[in-house]
């Protein structure tokens, strides 16, 4: 199994965390929602797997390209 770093595609604020550590996720399932310029953009899992780490929480600022989660898939 491979460790996959999940990157934020935009700069903004984490509005909602949809996954939790240890959860199984499907490919393209939203791990969290980032709010930017009054738009809510999901950050999807790039592959099916298990969430190993969540590096941000609700209300945290994120930058484009920042690692926000790690999954094992």
Image: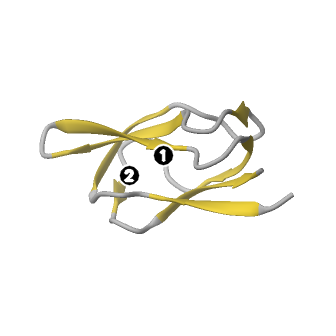
Q: Position of residue 30 (x, y in %)?
A: 50, 35
Does residue 56 lie above or below 45 as drawn? below
Q: Disc 1 to disc 2, how far (Cα)? A: 6 Å
Q: Position of residue 34 (x, y in %)?
A: 33, 44
Front residue of 61 and 44: 44
**Farthest-out residue, bottom:** 65
Q: Position of residue 66 (x, y in %)?
A: 44, 67
Look at 30% across and 49% down and name the residue there.
13
Q: Is residue 63 left or right of residue 21?
A: left
Quarter placement of the N terminus: bottom right
**Tag shown at residue 70:** none
Look at 47% across and 39% down and name the residue there.
32
For label 1, the residue is 57
Q: Callout 2: 10 Å neighbours few (<14), some, many (20+)?
A: few
Q: Is residue 25 left or right of residue 44?
A: right
Tell me which corner region of the image, top left, top right, bottom left or bottom right, holds residue 41. top left
Q: Callout 1: 10 Å neighbours few (<14), some, many (20+)?
A: some
For label 2, the residue is 60
In what element is the residue under mark 2? loop
Colour scheme of the picture: secondary structure
Q: Is residue 70 left or right of residue 50?
A: left
Task: Give the total of numbered labels.
Answer: 2
Q: Is residue 6 left or right of residue 64?
A: right
Q: Are marks 1 and 2 in contact (CB under 8 Å)?
A: yes
Look at 19% across and 37% down and name the residue there.
39
In what element is the residue under mark 1? loop
**Farthest-out residue, left:** 37
């Amino acid at each position: 199994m491979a460790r996959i770093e999940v990157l934020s595609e935009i700069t903004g604020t984490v509005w909602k965390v949809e996954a939790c550590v240890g959860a199984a996720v499907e490919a393209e399932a939203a791990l969290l929602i980032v709010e930017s310029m009054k738009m809510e953009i999901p950050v999807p899992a790039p592959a099916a797997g298990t969430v190993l780490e969540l590096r941000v929480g609700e209300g945290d600022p994120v930058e484009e390209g920042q690692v926000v989660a790690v999954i094992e898939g």
